[in-house]
Amino acid sequence: MNPTRIADLHIHTTVSDGGFCPGEVARLASAADLEIIAITDHDSVSAFDSFSPDWQLEVVPGVELSAYLGTREVHVLGYFLDPHEIRLRTALESLQKKRQARAFSIIRKLAEEKVNISCEEVFEAAGGCSVSRLHVAEVLIENGHSSNLYEAFRDFLGPGGAAFVPKPYFTVEGAIEMIRAAGGAAVLAHPRDNFTLREIAQFVDAGLDGIETFYPTHSKEHVDACLKAAETFGIVATGGSDFHGRRFADKPIGTARVDRETVEKLYERAGPNGIRRLS
């Protein structure tokens, strides 16, 4: 492990679909010799309501927003944003209500396929926080309807699955604008080879500040392509583990890391109302 790479900029907590609460995530990060983490829950910034100085590491306030480009799902990460910015909080609270409605729709579609799970089981898996397809998948596995996550999403929850329901989302431009308006820097999450340089150029024109380059499932070719895009467009090559810590979907915290210089470059891209860190 490169000792200069001390930052993991993509981590989820129980506020969305992670398996550990924010304080537990901080303890795991410290044990993994991380000095900086970004909490990037799906469509929520509520993790920062419970921030404590006892976490003893630098915490970058972040979020992961769902967006679409045509029929393709795009995730946009936001960093250094103000988690209390009114417009952002209002938009995310609305999304949470839509996520709950989506979960009910998925459960109804599953019932039509004679796959019966209860709303109570799904919302218990979510722990009262942002409910996602991952929580539904866990219940499907627990009840013997699927053997693993791949089957759950292939047969039921993914596009083409029997119970697929599109999630509420922003446009890519809307997600970037929302992050920028809250003082943050916007980063394209885990792009792999899903986007052309022309499409990334469109995102940059809309205000994109970085591209997630170092990621657990990125091949060397993916990393090289992201580095080329970052150099071409003058944006920041970032990285993170996408840690969830759930039983059926786990990438160890700190699996993908960047150095402090990268974090500083990203902060320089944030707006004048950006929050440097919670510490």
Image (tube, rainbow, N blue to C red):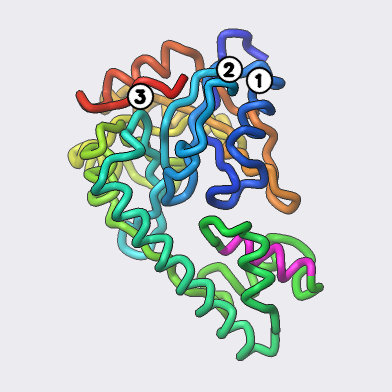
Looking at marks 2 and 3 on the same chain, the residue that comes earlier in the sequence is marked by: 2
Looking at marks 1 and 2 on the same chain, the residue that comes earlier in the sequence is marked by: 1
143 up-or-down from 51: above or below: below
Residue farthest along the top direction in this orientation? 4
Q: Kindly state the secondary structure of the residue where label 3 is placed.
A: strand
Residue 181, how many percent across, how many down?
A: 21, 39
Which quadrant holds residue 96? bottom left
In this view of the protein, which residue sits in the foreground, 204 or 20? 20
Q: Amino acid at mark 3?
A: Val
Residue 238, how many percent across, how many down?
A: 44, 26
Label 1: how many Cα within 10 Å (few below 14, some 14–19, many 20+): some
Q: Kindly state the secondary structure of the residue where label 2 is placed.
A: loop
Query: Residue shown at 69%/89% (left/top)?
Result: 114
Task: Return the mark for residue 236.
Answer: 3
Disc 2 versus disc 3: nearer the observer: 2
In this view of the protein, which residue sits in the foreground, 192 or 37? 37
Query: Residue shown at 57%/64% (left/top)?
Result: 133
Residue range highlighted in magenta: 133-142
Looking at marks 1 and 3 on the same chain, the residue that comes earlier in the sequence is marked by: 1
Residue to which mark 1 is pinned: 30
Which quadrant holds residue 215? top right
Q: Amino acid at mark 1?
A: Ser
Residue 205, how many percent across, how many down?
A: 18, 38
Q: Kindly state the secondary structure of the residue where label 1 is placed.
A: helix
Determine whether label 1 and label 3 are within 8 Å by CB.
no
Residue to which mark 2 is pinned: 56
